Each structure stands twice: as C-alpha cells, then as structure tokens.
C-alpha cells in the first residue's frame, strides 16, 4: 500500500520508510519534514506544482511528475464509439 511507505502525521510526511528506488508522493500531502528523506538516493514521483516537487527541488532529489497523456487517436475512437452506441 502506498501510504505504508511513509510515517505520516495528518498530511505531513515525517519519514520515508520504504527501501525502494522511487517514492510516490500522494497529492494530499501538504508538508514534508526537512529530514524525511535523509539518505534517500532514489527518485520522487509527484504531482506537478506540489509540495513534494518543491521539496525535491530544494533538496536536490531527483524527481518526476505525473503527466496525463492522452492518445488522441484512441480518444477519438472512444468518442465515435460512444456517439454510435445508441444506434447499435
């Protein structure tokens, strides 16, 4: 479970507990303790503009943001299917 990777108080990450190469930070986190990721040498995965992104930048931790990417062709096919559905 995602939240099992952290010691959390309210919406603050107190400590990263997992021994993994990536740390996926939930969007509802509003604060991260200054020493929460001491010794962590992996990558933080977070939402763009989040507290986690700012934290990673400040601490010099490698990070990647979630990006929603839609395949336009697949999306168009889905819309056509939905529109055509009533006539099937």
Image (cartoon, rainbow, N blue to C red):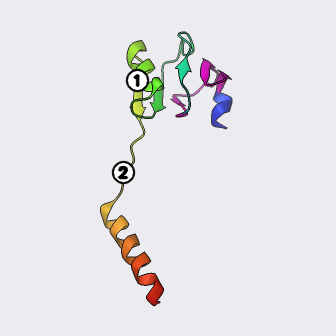
* Most foreground residue, 11 or 23: 11
Residue 63 on image: x %, y %: 41, 27
First reached walking from the N terminus: tag 2 or tag 1: 1
Locate residue 82: give its quadrant: bottom left
Report if residue 65 lies within the magenta region. Answer: no
Residue 36 on image: x %, y %: 57, 15
Residue 51 lies left or right of residue 13; in this view the side is: left
Q: Residue at x 53, y 30 (%)?
A: 25
Label 2 environment density (alpha carbons within 10 Å; few <14, some 14–19, many ≥20): few
Q: Secondary structure at mark 2?
A: loop
Residue 30 lies left or right of residue 48; in this view the side is: right
Residue 62 numbered mark, or none:
1
Residue 69 numbered mark, or none:
2
Locate residue 19: give its quadrant: top right
Residue 1 on image: x %, y %: 67, 38
Q: Residue at x 34, y 59 (%)?
A: 71
Q: Residue at x 47, y 85 (%)?
A: 86
């Amino acid at each position: 479970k995602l939240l099992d990777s952290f010691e959390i108080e309210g919406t603050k990450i107190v400590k990263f507990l997992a021994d993994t190469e990536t740390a996926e930070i939930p969007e509802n986190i509003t604060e991260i303790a200054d020493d929460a990721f001491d010794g962590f040498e992996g990558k933080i995965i977070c939402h763009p503009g989040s507290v986690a992104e700012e934290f990673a930048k400040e601490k010099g931790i490698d990070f990647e943001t979630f990006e929603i990417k839609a395949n336009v062709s697949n999306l168009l096919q889905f819309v056509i299917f939905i529109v055509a559905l009533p006539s099937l």
